[in-house]
Amino acid sequence: MGKSAAPDYIAGALIWLVALFCLGNGAFMLSAPMNWYWAIPTVPATGPANMHFIADIGLAYICCGTLLVYGAWYPAGRWLALVAGSLWLAAHGLFHIYELAASMSTVDRFLSDVPGVLGPPLLVFVALTILGVRRRITPAGIPKRVFLSLLEKLEPGESDFMRAIASAPGHALEKFMHLMPAAMHRHAANPDIFHLARIGATLEEDCGPCAMTAAHGALADGLAPDLVNQALSGGESLLGDQQTAYRFGQAIARHSVDAFTLGEELERKFGRAVRLELAMTAAFVRGYPAMKRGLGLNKSCAMTRLAV
């Protein structure tokens, strides 16, 4: 959610560095295998050159690099491509560690190989860790048990809902997890108007746990509790652009013609991309209470205190 910050750029740079290394090394091995063989001081010590095997390994590097390039364009959503792209690199590094432990390699040779063998997978791991700590990784692809466990800690009120989906056959939860990032897509919009539109749309469908989930998302994105509580209480005290965004979310949820005029007002001031993001979150966030209603999991409004 939101524009990239310095840690995100660092993670992306690390991935690009490894990707370009893999592609460059693979191209070198394929185009000039003997030159590559003699260019790496520790390689001749492993035995005579085999051009076929060198080309095979070069192809493995190119495949890894291609996956990493694909993932580097959108690491938060394509993190599984990054895992796949670094899998052979990590296995290669572990094999070198095994050789050292089994006395099949000298310490000097192992240390010489560390930057090119262990460095690349470690850099990808560091990048993924940065994205994970910053909650930049989309849920799609996370193992079911891990996802449900994390959800239980972050949003206990949503666990029953997600467990109901997880119990359905045909990978229902995995398919639903691909939808979730669309409801939280924010790049150009300021956090305040984005979340106010989101809360406004949610309250038209729900007055309980879903509304509080939207509120907690707003807090996590930096909105002040007082502003969130104004939205939860109906938005009457909101002013200016904040009220316009809130009413825009409501209008979308109500199928009101006001969505056209409010949307045009927002577009004139903030641009088409911002209008799209507010419309997108207002449209998709309604799916959560609608699903709960269909599954019979709605709770009474009196059971949920709408305040943070």
Image: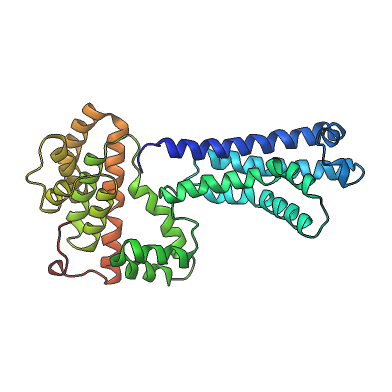
Could you tell me which quadrant the N terminus lies in? top left
- On screen, residue 31 above or below 206: above
- In front of the other: 179 or 28: 28
- Residue 8 in the image: x percent, y percent? 45, 39
- Residue 92 horizontal side relative to residue 14, left or right: right
- Residue 214 in the image: x percent, y percent? 25, 54
Residue 64 seen anywhere in this rendered image of the structure: yes
Could you tell me which quadrant the C terminus lies in? bottom left
- On screen, residue 300 above or below 280: below
Residue drawn at the location 26% of the way across and 44% of the way down: 222
Residue 251: which quarter of the image? Answer: top left
Residue 25: which quarter of the image? Answer: top right
How many numbered circles are shown? 0
- In front of the other: 6 or 161: 6
Residue drawn at the location 34% of the way across and 47% of the way down: 184
Residue 196: which quarter of the image? Answer: top left
- Residue 240 horizontal side relative to residue 110, left or right: left
Q: What's the coloring here?
A: rainbow
Residue drawn at the location 15% of the way across and 38% of the way down: 244
> Farthest residue toward the right?
48
> Farthest residue toward the top?
268
> Farthest residue toward the front?
107
- Residue 146 in the image: x percent, y percent? 46, 64
Residue 257 seen anywhere in this rendered image of the structure: no
- On screen, residue 146 above or below 85: below
- In front of the other: 256 or 232: 232
- Residue 17 in the image: x percent, y percent? 60, 35
